[in-house]
Amino acid sequence: MTPRHPISKSSIKARQSSKRQNNPNEPKVSQQPSQSLIEPGLYIIASPIGNLGDITLRAIETLKSSNLIACEDTRITRRLLSHYNINIPTTAYHEHNANTALPRLIKRLKNNEIVSLISDAGTPLISDPGYRLVQAAIAEDILITTTPGPVAAIAALTLSGLPTDSFFFAGFLPPKQTAKKNRIYQLANVPSTLIFYESPRRLSQTLKEMANIYGNRPAALVREISKKFEEVRRGTIGELSNELNALGQPRGEIVLLIGPPTPEKIIDNSEIDAELIKALAEMSLRDAVEKISLSFGMPKRQIYRRALEITSLDETEL
């Protein structure tokens, strides 16, 4: 099967030029932005994350030229569309209806319509199910392009004062406590600034877990980006945790950023192995795994797998 490649702006223009040459009776089209210059396909539209002025002129033009706008919540998108006097039909597309909505959208796209995909705020596909629609469009060889714009994670990174040369977007942490703790630990040695989206009601517990596992790393809490009550708090994880306890639960959209570990803070697996070998010599496998898991704040599954590897090595050496 021949691999499909992204379609560049130049190839779009080439298609349009080819179509005009095939029809000599078609009038010449102005090079100014207009509906006739937008080719049928899927357009990923970045929307404002707060201030309605944070949208590109191209995004507005594309929305106005669309046959259909797929969005997370039609009520939220309608406020944006009304602000810019855009009267285009909308349809809901989100994680709860993706199975039924996706085939309908693909059918419209295969009928050579212009479908715009927009999220409630920011860039689609970031912590939403839009990637499934993109995958389906790729499989059908449908044109896909984007109108870049706001992303809360990147906006928060620029405000944080933390290193920007390398960063890791971790999205939302699992809601259940054990799974959350395991995920926080898994990211402990990532040598980059970590970026999380977090619910205000879970933020306090998240900071406590991070303080236990990450120690006193620098961090930033960015809230309500580009809105009236935008706020940035900077300090160590412990300092932010204490501030939050004193001030109470914050409101609004939260982005939490954690600075990268210093070399001495990177967890040494050889140290874990040494403690595990010592524990296995004194107690049962189950008890040893329990002890080391608690000591290092690591998932039991990970310690258990390593314990099996160690015991297997010992048997081989014997």
Image (spheres, rainbow, N blue to C red):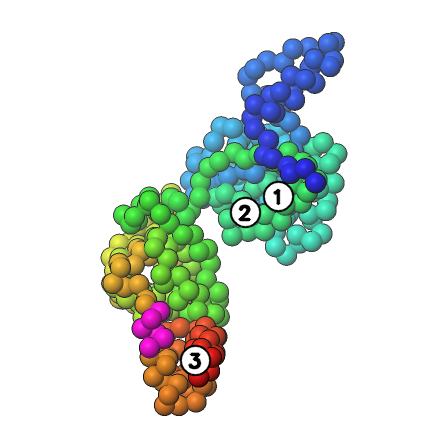
Residue at x 61%, y 55% (from the top left corner): 95
How far across and down, in percent of the image, does residue 123 sit?
50, 43
Residue 224 visible: no
Q: Is residue 72 above or below residue 60?
A: below
Residue occupied by mark 2:
125
* Side of 204 where 302 appears, left or right: right
How far across and down, in percent of the image, does residue 269 sit?
35, 69
How far across and down, in percent of the image, does residue 173 sit?
46, 62
Residue 134 marker: 1
Magenta span: predominant SS is helix
The question of residue 158 being in magenta is answered with no
Give the residues drawn in magenta, as a range: 269-274
Residue 27 visible: yes
State the image quarter where residue 244 is shown. bottom left
Residue at x 60%, y 21% (from the top left corner): 13
Residue positioned most to the front: 318
Residue occupied by mark 3:
317
